[in-house]
Amino acid sequence: MAKKEFSVLNLLDLELEGHNSLHLRCLSGRRGLVRTIQVPDLNRPGLALSGFFDSFAHERVQVFGLGEVSYLRKLEKEKKDVDLRTFFSQEIPCCVFTHDLEPTEQFAKISEEVGCPLLQTSLKSTDFSSRILRVFSNIFAPSQTLHGVLVEVYGVGIILLGDSGVGKSETALELIERGHRLVADDTVEIRCVNGNTILGQGANKIISHHMEIRGLGIINIAQLYGVGAIREQKKVQLVVKLAEWDADKVYDRLGTKQNTTDLLGVKVRLIEIPVRPGRNVPIIIETAAMNERLQSMGYHSARDFNINVLKWIETGDAQAAYYGSEDVY
Amino acid sequence: MKEKLLTVRNRAGIHARPAALIAQTANKFASEILIERGDTVINAKSIMGVITMAAGYNTTLTLRATGSDEEAAVAAIYALFESKFEEE
């Protein structure tokens, strides 16, 4: 996968709202807004400002809080020269001043000269750090595009995979008709967040809630079924593979075996459903979703059924049933 | 596996009609056909996928086919791009 280019300008351009907003604005060094952020992490440059540059994490976003700024001001007042030239000679993506703090005159001047963007935010350093790390973990998360449909059924995120023409979109359409939600059709972008969660969404916001149904053409789900029938993104909890019925293949009849598949290094439960005319796939998927929820609550239909069967055989009531003398429920 | 570079030659880029043409052509072949633009890879057999690429005029794409009829599939889709999707 190609490494993502993420510049400081992209960071300013992010459309984040409410408690996600970074409240960033650019103070100077606009020329450097094209600089890319290579390492999605932060650094407090206290040591570097005092002149110690060993192991200086210059490739990270440099955060200037109350401590760093008062140090700069103190030095400026005492007319002491800070080694700012050396500081800026390193490849720094950008400097961020929290608490709406203003950089010192000299600092702003040199940053403008070398073209290092200075950003300012009204947030506290701690808030800013946690927010930007969250943003980074989203942006730099490993991602992949899949050919399939992502739907939410009874709150379970299900991705339908299968060859072209097997009926993924038709199945999804019936699920929507039955009150479930469409996240994305055809091109689903999945991202691995925190190393254990797979989030899926449409690859393109403008066309993600449209579907192509053979014989009908392109339809707009949001307009047809209302805003309640769509969702922006959803955690992928189940992978359903649709395939043409293959008479030679042995399909799972009990459901005691748990199959999983690998999505970006995360194991996700996998169900293979054979498609054949007359098989109502949407209802099977609905049931799979409910079964999945039961299992996550600790109830496993197939396993518990087998435990009951074993108990029943052991008690000897099973034999009694043959004589019809007792009810054995 | 067969690979070929494609260039969008019609002014309007790949909008709905060319996308439908590409998907229709791709569906005639048994091979798995993928089109790559930057770091997004899409299935050429899906109209919505092809539109998602938002490939404008002069965009370069990579076509990749794997399967028994890969040669023919690549040739057919390449011809489609060269004919400017019968638009101009």
Image (cartoon, coloured by chain):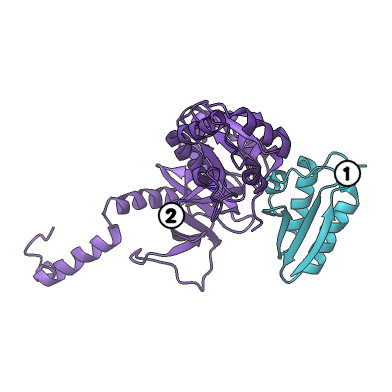
Chain colours: A purple, B cyan
Q: Nearer the viewer, residue B14 or A67?
A: A67
Which amino acid type corresponds to the residue marked 1 in the rendered image? Answer: Asn
User: Which quadrant: the N terminus of chain A?
Assistant: bottom right
The residue at the point 82 percent across, 48 percent down is B59
Q: Nearer the viewer, residue A111 or A294?
A: A111
Foreground mark, 1 or 2, reads: 2
Q: Position of residue A55 (x, y in %)?
A: 54, 56
The residue at the point 42 percent across, 65 percent down is A259
The residue at the point 51 percent across, 45 percent down is A43
Q: Please name the residue that numbered disc 1 is placed on.
A: B10
- What's the CA distance linking mark 1 and mark 2? 43 Å
To which quarter of the image does residue A313 belong? bottom left
Which amino acid type corresponds to the residue marked 2 in the rendered image? Answer: Asn
Circles 1 and 2 on the same subunit: no
- Relative to residue B30, is residue A55 depicted above or below? above
Q: Position of residue A53 (x, y in %)?
A: 56, 51
User: Which quadrant: the C terminus of chain A?
Assistant: bottom left
Q: Specify whether A193 is left or right of A109.
A: left
Q: Nearer the viewer, residue A121 or A136?
A: A121
Q: Nearer the viewer, residue A46 or A251?
A: A46
Callout 1 secondary element? loop
The residue at the point 62 percent across, 50 percent down is A38
Callout 2 secondary element? loop
Q: Please name the residue that numbered disc 2 is placed on.
A: A196
Is any part of residue A99 visible from this angle?
yes
The subunit carrying tag 1 is B
Q: Specify whether A303 is left or right of A2.
A: left
To which quarter of the image does residue A304 belong? bottom left
Pointer 1 local density, CA inside 10 Å: few below 14, some 14–19, many at least 20:
some
Pick out the residue farthest to the left: A325
Q: Position of residue A142 (x, y in %)?
A: 56, 54
Q: Position of residue A147 (x, y in %)?
A: 61, 53
